[in-house]
Amino acid sequence: MIKNKFSIFSLAALLLAVALLAAGCVSSADNPENEAASKGTVMLVTTPYGTAISSSNVMKLVLEEAGYDTELKLADVGVAWQSVAAGSSDLLTDAWLPDTHKQYMDKYENDVVYVKKNLEGGTRCGLVVPAYVTIDSIDELNSEKEKFDGKIIGIEPGAGIMISSEEAIAEYGLDYELMTGSEVSMITTLMDAIDSEEWVVVTGWSPHWKFQRWDLKYLDDPKGVYGDKGDIVTIARTGLDEDAPEAYAILEKFEWTPADMEAVMYDMEQGMTEEEAAAKWIENNRDRVDMWLGNE
């Protein structure tokens, strides 16, 4: 009998809850997940480099805090730009301009929106060697070809720095082979060479945690193949400002420093997941994130 009474009371409570929901007696404030979901989903695209992964994961968490669902997909640089231009991705937080990603901006400038510099004047690209290497300029590489084994250690073939490095080989008449790989394989080769105090030259860029870990230097680029110091820019698909105005307003305020970015990259290199490192940075920089969110 007690069991039957419990079942009747449970059924009555369930029916009452359903009735209240149907009548609109449960507000959206009582279910914040529904309220957040009503803002829609923002599709972020990132590339397989520390700068992109750090900024995209920070922005992902900030947008989620603002009430958006998010999806983050990985692509090489060319595909990332193409996806924003085509509208299949909403934004990319790691466009290196004006030089490194110049070919992509030239190709898609009418199909993407230049939102804002999120890291101004803090980027550099070029050929990097350990500080103990005794040459200082790209035009000295041929004289030390044997010590470098005639190889420049690169990353993915679609990366802007790889295109610039191919141009550097031609401009300087370098008798070197540009080796393709990944950021991970490049770092591994660099680390092994340093451990053995061997000479090595790699494609390098800043910000990057490798400059925190090892004593490295850029080779001078007298022909200016790699360009001057540049910016990291947020680009968005056309129409995002109308479809997700609050998200777009956050992007318009998003800016940080090389030190901020390197802090996230360093924590990832030390073993944190991408999301853990991003969350730690947000926790340590609450005032700035609140400013992006308009909560100041």
Image (cartoon, helix red, strand yellow):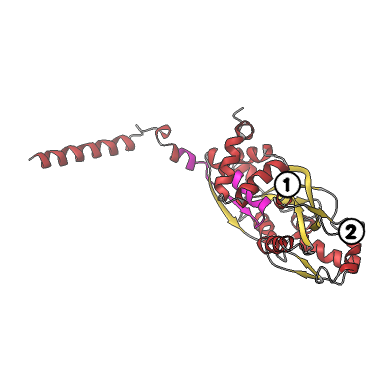
Pick the residue in front: 293 or 236: 293
> Based on the displayed image, in which of its 4 quarters is residue 16 positioned?
top left
- Does 188 appear above or below 149? above
| Residue appearing at x 72%, y 40% in the figure | 257
Left or right of 123 in this view: 172: right
Residue 75 visible? The answer is: yes
* Tag count: 2
- Residue 39 lies within the magenta run: yes
Rendering coords of residue 121 (x, y %): 80, 43
Q: Which mark is residue 233?
A: 1
Q: Find the distance from the CA under tag 2 to the CA under tag 1.
A: 29 Å
Pick the residue in front: 246 or 293: 293
- Residue 120 lies within the magenta run: no
**Most extreme residue toward the top, as rendered?**
296
Q: Which mark is residue 137?
A: 2
> Based on the displayed image, in which of its 4 quarters is residue 288 positioned?
top right
